[in-house]
Image (cartoon, grey):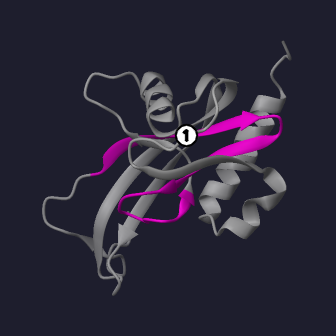
Amino acid sequence: MTNTRNRPQPVDGLRPQAAVGVVCIRDGQVLLIRRGTPPLTGEWSLPGGRIEPGEPVRDAALRELMEETGIKAEIAGLIDVVDAIVENRERTLVTRHYVLTDFAARWLEGEPVAGDDAADARFFPLAELHSLGLWDETERVVRAGARLVAQLPHD
């Protein structure tokens, strides 16, 4: 049994939301977006978002990638499923909870253009990840996704 005494409690009615993230790789670089809306406005993160009812999770990943960046890609594989739990400043309440299914994808076409709820979209060399202030889990998932894409046969 899990000890919940020291864990922040969810706000009334909060339910985890299913979402996707995409690690899109082109020439050894990863595509990131600068968030244009809460939560985490202004921070760099993976393209992604909520899964629509009835939408297959892989389709949601490719749709979110296109909406937020204008990039077309192919899914290379599943990286991981990660919880993103957002707490209030006092760390007494959970205000958001996303269950993120993260996929690796190989870029097919297009240049990044911020769209939808992204303020910016661009490719970054993997060596620059640490300087962007990414969430530790995001950095881990990006590196795992880059390894998956590198294993794909080249066209």
Q: Looking at the picture, how far across and down is residue 42, in whole percent?
A: 49, 65
In terms of depth relative to the viewer, which is nearer, 47 or 119?
119
- Amino acid under label 1? Val
User: Would residue 38 be counted in the magenta stretch?
Assistant: yes
Residue drawn where x is 30% and y is 51% of the image: 16
Q: In the rendered image of this protein, does residue 52 appear above or below residue 15?
A: above
154 above or below 63?
above
- What's the residue at 55%, 40% (across, down)? 113
Q: Which quadrant of the figure contains the C terminus?
A: top right
Task: Identify the residue position indicated by label 1 in the image.
Answer: 113
Quadrant containing the N terminus in the rendered view: bottom left
Question: What percent of the width, then of the height, locates residue 85?
Answer: 40, 63
Q: Start and end of the magenta stretch?
A: 16-44
Quick check: is 31 in the magenta stretch?
A: yes
- Observer-nearest of 125 and 153: 125
* Image quadrant assignment for residue 73: top right
Q: Is residue 34 above or below residue 25?
A: below
